[in-house]
Image (cartoon, grey):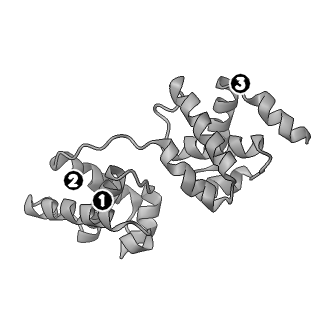
Amino acid sequence: RVSSYLRLPKSVEEEAARIYRSAVQKGLVRGRSMESVVAGALYAACRRHEIPRTLDEMGEASGIEKKEIGRTYRFVTRELEISIRPSNPADYIPRFASALKLSPETQSKAVVILEQARDIELTSGRGPTGIAAAALYVASLIHGEKRTQREVADVAGVTEVTIRNRYKELIKKLKLSKDVEKTKKN
C-alpha cells in the first residue's frame, strides 16, 4: 500500500519485502510495530535503489512518525548489516523539478551547480534534500524561471530558512551572484 502510494517500482517493493523477511527471521520486529518495520524496510530499499524518498514522504504514506521510521531504518540496516551510501542530492533534482514544472535546462544547471558544490565539499554534512532544492532554486533564477523559496521548500519538504541558507552558501562559494543578477535585470 505504502509502495503504491509513493509510486515505487516493483524492484524496490521486492527489496523491501526481502529486508522485512530478514528482519522477522532475526527477531528484529519484537517491540516494534509491524508498520514501522515495513516503512523502515521500504525506506532502506529506496535508498539502495537510489530512488530517494524523504522520511517525511514515508511518514505521510505510512501514517508512522518520521522519527520512528528513521529509528527503525537505522536499527534494521545496522542489525542486518545492509550498507547504504549517503543519498546523492542530484537524485532529487528530477522529481523536484518536475513538481515545480521547470525546464530540462534548469534541471541540468542544478545538477552542474551540485557537482561544483560537491567538488568544493559544500555538500558534505548538509541534508541532501535542502542542498538539492537550493541548487534548483539558484538554477531557476539563472534561467529566468522564477519560483519562490516557499514553492521550492514545499516541494522539497524543507523550510524556507534551509533554502535561504543553502542559497547564500551556493551563491557565495560558487560565485554565482553575477549569473543570478543578470536575469533579475531582464
What's the residue at 67%, 37% (across, down)?
Answer: 167
The span from disc 2 to disc 1 (Cα, nearest Å) is: 8 Å
Residue 175 image label: 3
Give the vertical position of 34 relative to 161 (above or below): below
Which mark sits nearer the N-terminus, 1 or 3? 1
Q: Quadrant of residue 143?
A: top right
Q: Which residue is mark 2?
A: 76
The span from disc 2 to disc 3 (Cα, nearest Å) is: 42 Å
Estimate the x, y position of residue 116 in percent, counting from the top left.
58, 29
Asked whether the beta carbons under mark 1 and mark 3 sit within 8 Å of each other, the answer is no
Frontmost of labels 1 and 3 is 3
- Helix, strand or loop at disc 2? helix
What's the residue at 36%, 56% (across, down)?
Answer: 46
| Label 1 crowd (10 A; few <14 / some 14-19 / many >=20) | many
| Label 2 crowd (10 A; few <14 / some 14-19 / many >=20) | many
Residue 96 visible in the picture? yes
Placement of the C terminus among the 4 image quadrants: top right
Residue 40 image label: 1
Which mark sits nearer the N-terminus, 2 or 3? 2
What's the residue at 86%, 40% (across, down)?
Answer: 184
What's the residue at 42%, 64% (across, down)?
Answer: 59
| Label 3 crowd (10 A; few <14 / some 14-19 / many >=20) | few
The span from disc 1 to disc 3 (Cα, nearest Å) is: 40 Å
Is residue 89 left or right of 27 when viewed as pictured?
A: right
User: Residue flagged by tag 3: what amino acid is it?
Assistant: Lys
- Helix, strand or loop at disc 1? helix
